[in-house]
Amino acid sequence: MARRFLIGLAACAALLAPTLASAGPTLDAIKERGSLRCAVNTGLLGFSAPDSKGRWNGIDADFCRAVAAAILGDPEKVQFVATNAQNRFTVLQAGEADMLSRNTTWTSSRDATLGSVFTGVLFYDGQGFMVPKKLGVKSAKELDGATVCVQPGTSRAPPPS
């Protein structure tokens, strides 16, 4: 009985003992460089787009500045890396950007295969179809056999053949 108590006490002590914390290589690199490299859309108004003076604006650009402020104490210590749907993950995986803040669908397959960490939803949206009213379509199921276009590199696009 006393032995089990001592083993349990030792296990609790081990769990509660202070350990050396490591920020991780990405955070360490950001601090050493003195700037956050943030991948954004090439120009999606309201999300990330440079103005006439080249200053990035929108919710994604603002989020990048908030992260830079949290890490480096200055919201202006961010370098924006323009990406598109086809190259955004390659840029992130190659280390050309420290984080991705742009319209990107969080899927279980991306969670499992990209080697990245999705941290939360910044903006939630959905998809829909626009068809001429004269067709009288009431449901997407009625579009069976119709041609539907999607942007390459997105979660709704078929893989390249």
Image: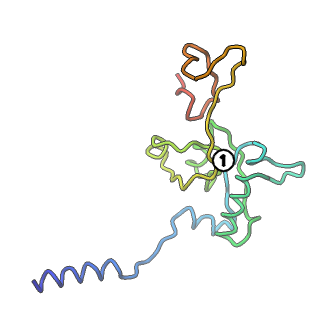
Q: Where is residue 160 in the image (x, y as percent from the top left)?
A: 54, 25
Q: Which residue is drawn at 62% across and 46% down?
A: 124
Q: Position of residue 67 (x, y in %)?
A: 66, 63
Q: In this view of the protein, which residue sits in the foreground, 48 or 120? A: 120
How is the protein colored in the picture?
rainbow
Q: Which amino acid, mark 1?
A: Arg
Q: In this view, does 95 lie above or below 7?
A: above
Q: In this view of the protein, which residue sits in the foreground, 144 or 90? A: 144
Q: In this view of the protein, which residue sits in the foreground, 151 or 32? A: 151
Q: Quadrant of residue 9?
A: bottom left
Q: In this view, does 47 lie above or below 33?
A: above
Q: Is mark 1 on a helix, strand or loop?
A: loop
Q: Which residue is drawn at 69% across and 25% down?
A: 130
User: On the rendered structure, is 12 left or right of 3?
Assistant: right
**Crowd around label 1: few <14 · some 14–19 · many ≥20 (10 Å):** many
Which image quarter is the N terminus in? bottom left
Q: Is residue 14 above or below residue 36?
A: below
Q: Name the residue under label 1.
A: 102
Q: Which residue is drawn at 12% across and 86% down?
A: 2
User: On the rendered structure, is 68 left or right of 108?
Assistant: right
Q: Position of residue 60 (x, y in %)?
A: 70, 52
Q: Where is residue 111 in the image (x, y as percent from the top left)?
A: 47, 46
Q: In this view of the protein, which residue sits in the foreground, 39 or 93? A: 39
State how many labels appear. 1
Q: Determine the residue located farthest toward the right in the rendered image.
A: 52
Q: Residue at x 74, y 42 (%)?
A: 42
